[in-house]
């Protein structure tokens, strides 16, 4: 009778434990849910500093990113970009180099939008020599038109001018940024409209050197076993040297299921670069928008840390089988919409990314 009672108590305990214990996934989901609820109270604020040529974007008094227009970068950029926990996911070089980083492609700074052949001028590679290139186009910041703070989301509207080496304006740019905090997610939506100026049409001639790009921290690069020789639009070579793979954990995954460096030159609705910085699981996702030209976009995504969506680089990506030279007529406009998602502590699943992409498509 005593043994029977012990057995009943043991079975009751096992049943209770099995009903009340939670899997790691359930705990993680609950933490994300709680974090999401907390984020509803996070205020997005802006700190404008004209002397430093910057506008800091703060989430709950912590830096998320900074809109900058340095004279020696030749375009406005978002730099740095940080996770919800405060980890930088962008490369520091050349503005604030960090130990162990690559020091190639000086013009790839933070996050930006430009292109390698606009009426024959190179906006993408300008500054690659450490100073302005002879044929380099510049995107000149003009002003901040709106700063709208809010809970969970803040909006900034900027204006800029795409000018050729003589100072002639080719395109007028108006960009609307939406900075969003959702739990452990940080989101940047960029809606940019370009208008052809000067009474002339503007041609985006087909090249792989573009368009909406980000250069990530060393730890998020893909491990590499050898030197890589890359060429720009003019055929000039650049060697990307092999480095130690210690702590290097990045990998690409596209909406079409392609992974690794094989994603280069493929088309996809979104691209996920996931890896770790220290013990922190991180996903960095760029989403294309159905309204964008040539959707779904081609991807100029390299293992050494360059991660870019390029709807115009058709000839290079198809090995000459197709070509796209797009013209904006005089006075006409073209709009681009892209979303960046930065996840902290959690590698995003396809379902989670698809949900965010659908939200982005429906919102704008």
Image (cartoon, rainbow, N blue to C red):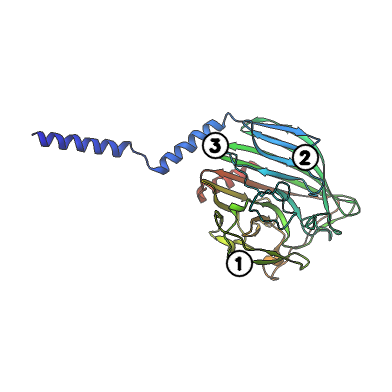
- Residue 18's label in the rendered image is none
Of residues 149 and 291, the one drawn nearer to the viewer in this rendering: 149
Q: Is residue 254 visible?
A: no
- The residue positioned 76% from the left and 38% from the top of the image is 54
Which residue occupies the extreme front position in the image?
99
Q: What residue is at 70 percent from the left and 44 percent from the top?
A: 79
Which of the two labelled residues, at mark 3 and mark 1, occupies the earlier sequence position? 3
In this rendering, position of residue 201 left or right of residue 309: right
Label 3, label 2: how many angstroms apart (C-alpha)? 27 Å
* Rendered location of residue 314, percent (x, y): 70, 64
Label 2 secondary element: strand
Q: For the residue carrying disc 1, how many other residues have a C-alpha within 10 Å: few (<14), some (14-19), or many (20+)?
A: few
* Residue underneath mark 1: 226
Q: Cα distance, mark 3 to mark 1?
A: 39 Å
Q: Nearer the viewer, mark 2 or mark 1?
A: 1
Disc on the earlier residue, 3 or 2 = 2
Residue 59 occupies quadrant: top right
Q: CA distance from mark 2 to mark 1?
A: 42 Å
Counting residues from the N terminus, which is met first, the one under dot 2 or under dot 1? 2
Task: Tell me the element at label 3.
Answer: loop
**Residue 309 appears in which quarter of the rendering?**
bottom right
In the image shown, does 135 or 229 lie closer to the viewer?
229
Q: State whether residue 195 appears in this view.
A: yes
Q: Quadrant of residue 242?
A: bottom right
> Callout 2: 10 Å neighbours few (<14), some, many (20+)?
some
Label 3 crowding class (10 Å Cα cut-off): few <14, some 14-19, many 20+?
A: many
Q: Which mark is residue 158?
A: 2
With respect to residue 317, does 356 lie above or below?
Answer: above
Image coordinates of residue 92 in percent, x first then y, are 68, 48
Tell me the tag on residue 183: 3
Q: Is residue 118 left or right of residue 291?
A: right
């Amino acid at each position: 009778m005593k043994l029977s009672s012990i057995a009943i108590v043991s079975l009751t305990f096992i049943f209770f434990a099995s009903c009340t214990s939670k899997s790691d996934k359930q705990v993680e989901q609950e933490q994300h849910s709680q974090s999401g609820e907390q984020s509803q109270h996070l205020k997005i604020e802006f700190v404008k500093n004209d002397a430093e040529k910057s506008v800091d974007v703060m989430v709950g008094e912590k830096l998320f990113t900074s809109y900058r227009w340095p004279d020696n970068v030749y375009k406005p950029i978002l730099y740095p970009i940080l996770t919800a926990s405060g980890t930088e996911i962008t490369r520091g070089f050349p503005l604030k180099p960090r130990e162990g980083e690559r020091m190639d492609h000086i013009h790839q700074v933070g996050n930006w939008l430009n292109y390698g052949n606009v009426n024959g001028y190179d906006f993408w590679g300008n500054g690659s020599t450490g100073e302005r290139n002879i044929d380099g186009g510049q995107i000149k910041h003009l002003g901040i038109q709106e700063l709208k703070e809010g809970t969970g989301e803040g909006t900034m509207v900027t204006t800029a001018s795409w000018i050729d080496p003589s100072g002639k304006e080719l395109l007028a740019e108006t960009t609307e940024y939406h900075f969003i905090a959702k739990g452990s997610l940080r989101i940047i939506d960029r809606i940019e409209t370009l208008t052809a100026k000067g009474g002339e049409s503007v041609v985006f001639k087909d090249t792989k050197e573009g368009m909406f790009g980000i250069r990530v921290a060393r730890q998020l690069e893909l491990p590499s076993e050898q030197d890589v020789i890359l060429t720009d639009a003019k055929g000039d070579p650049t060697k990307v040297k092999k480095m130690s793979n210690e702590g290097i954990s990045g990998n690409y995954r596209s909406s079409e299921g392609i992974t690794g460096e094989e994603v280069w030159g493929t088309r996809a609705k979104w691209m996920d670069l996931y890896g770790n910085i220290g013990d922190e699981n991180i996903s960095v996702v760029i989403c294309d928008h159905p309204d964008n030209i040539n959707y779904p976009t081609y991807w100029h995504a390299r293992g050494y840390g360059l991660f870019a969506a390029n709807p115009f680089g058709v000839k290079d990506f198809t090995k000459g089988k197709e070509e796209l030279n797009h013209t904006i007529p005089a006075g006409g406009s073209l709009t681009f919409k892209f979303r960046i998602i930065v996840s902290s502590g959690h590698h995003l699943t396809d379902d989670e990314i698809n949900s965010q992409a659908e939200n982005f498509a429906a919102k704008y």
